[in-house]
Amino acid sequence: AFVTLATNDTYALGCLVLANSIRQTKTTRKLVVMLTDGVTSSMRHQLERVFDVLYDVDLLDSRDSCNLALLGRPDLSCTFTKLHCWKLTQFDKAVFLDADTLVLQGVDELFDREELSASPDAGWPDCFNSGVFVFKPSEETYAALRDFALAQGSFDGGDQGLLNLFFRDWATKDIARHLPFIYNVVSQAFYSYLPAFTQFKNDIKIVHFIGQVKPWHHSFNTITGQVQLLPGTGHDQNFLQLWWNLFIKHVQPALDPTVGGLVGELASLQIKSGGPSVVFLDDSDRRLAWERGQMDYMGVDSFENIQRKLDSKIEDRS
Amino acid sequence: AFVTLATNDTYALGCLVLANSIRQTKTTRKLVVMLTDGVTSSMRHQLERVFDVLYDVDLLDSRDSCNLALLGRPDLSCTFTKLHCWKLTQFDKAVFLDADTLVLQGVDELFDREELSASPDAGWPDCFNSGVFVFKPSEETYAALRDFALAQGSFDGGDQGLLNLFFRDWATKDIARHLPFIYNVVSQAFYSYLPAFTQFKNDIKIVHFIGQVKPWHHSFNTITGQVQLLPGTGHDQNFLQLWWNLFIKHVQPALDPTVGGLVGELASLQIKSGGPSVVFLDDSDRRLAWERGQMDYMGVDSFENIQRKLDSKIEDRS
């Protein structure tokens, strides 16, 4: 199975686009989404339309021995959400994909790989990036990961640091466990070594929109049907357009406009109807991030953008 | 042998610091520097003091069949300068190191690796970074590289693109040919995935100051003995300080102040003598880059820096 994770309605949007991108490849594999209670029942219904299996991850379920062990360590609970995928033992083998990835070509051949196979992380390539990985569901591995996490923690506070410590021979043991980078091309690779990106662009199978700005944060022109990039994100126009094309075609028409937040805003979009030509979709989302202190100084919150926004407001009033 | 390359006096400075950093590890291997005629005879003498072998690379030497073949392709001559290392057939095995690398710990174990071994490039990790690689000198390989270059070219206009196409099974064939990233940690890795950098920092064996700004471009405070970083380069203060410590101790005292350019400026530095406390070493160098259109908008040539420089000049006059 292909497995992804939704911890709230916004990430559920990512899951929906991801699932549609996988369906396009005519895969024979099942699609599984893991859900936390941050997802509304409205979005659950949307997910049911495209995923074969919805798997609830309840971190406070005390019937789960792992959760019991983690009760004293709330700092690890977030890390552990993703690791619940190892409990999907109804599947022999599975591929995990983050909600901010997009599949461009068939990738069923990934199921020929062994645990743990993953692509190198472009930031520190002796680590793998845990946004895409092949694994073998197993209660034993899940318990071992729990014990390891309790003893060692994670060097980056997330699942990637933990998984890299747990599967620590990845960098040195077996080249077959190195997925080619084309299975997890992170946005920063688009500009870090541009000639390589240009050379290998057509081979890319999965893109990964890492960073704080996600595909759903960009603006979308409902008249032209074109995505309009926020500056400084390093995202690629063409890949973002593919994301939005899937979103507008398969996801948006079924969204419930009575749901709050970004999902409600998106559900209300009037495509090609003569409404506002550019919709800044993400203001509430971004304000939330700002209030939580996660300002993105180089990206959407840079002085230039703030200035532009202020200017546009001033113009509105004059 | 360890092999590096100097195409002008400034890069020769890098070679001198690099050689001293290798000598510090008490290596049993020879040190070789390849030289083009861009290096002055004064700097040749400096290089002779620390390198065992000086190897002249004369791209216009028509007795070299490779050069003959390349005569009609001046675009490839620069790419080929580095590849002359394959002609050092007096050595069974060799390790190439770019002039902007610095060795922090003994790396003689690299000679146990086979051709072609290299670390993944942090920008596109299915490519190796050609700043550090293990190779086997051979006239046959050199000729094959020449023919390949003439037929295929290089996708990035440099040796890295060419070598990655030539040794194209590097990413998929043999994990032993993947040098750990700690043998070629590029500056951008210091901030791309900071937790990994923090976690593995003490394991780093070779740092690679990639990008347009090189260690010798930063300012140096002759009173405190501290390097002062230009903003926006992504360089790490501690590693840069190591570079400068070696430079001041082993290289600077012997430099000839009558040589022009950066070398002359550096030779004239009065360490701890009460001269100017901060020396901007690189003005002429940087002006040259600017005139050639290689402005570094995000780094030393950013508006902020230009503004700061203008301000300091205005203050000087008032």
Image (tube, coloured by chain):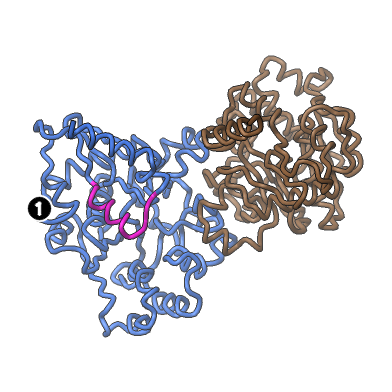
Chain colours: A blue, B brown
Residue drawn where x is 65% and y is 44% of the image: B209
Give left or right: position of B214 versus A15: right
Residue A272 rendering spot, x and y as whole percentages: 12, 32
Three-letter code for the amino acid on which mark 1 is drawn: Asp
Res B151 → quadrant: top right
- Residue on which the image places disc 1: A256
Residue A127 against residue A61 in the figure, above or below: above
Indicate yes or no whether the magenta region holds residue A68. Answer: no
SS of the residue under disc 1 = loop
**In-image side of B186 versus B67 (left or right):** left
The one nearer the camera, B224 or A123, is: B224
Q: Residue at x 78, y 34 (%)?
A: B6
**Front position in the image: A189 or B45:** B45
Residue B43 picture quarter: top right
Q: Kindly identify which chain the residue marked by label 1 belongs to.
A: A
* Residue A183 sits above or below residue A169 on the image: above
Q: How many marks?
A: 1
Point 79% across, 31% down: residue = B9
Q: Is residue A226 left or right of residue B208?
A: left
> Looking at the image, is A92 positioned above or below residue B64?
below
Q: Which residues are magenta?
A: A282-296
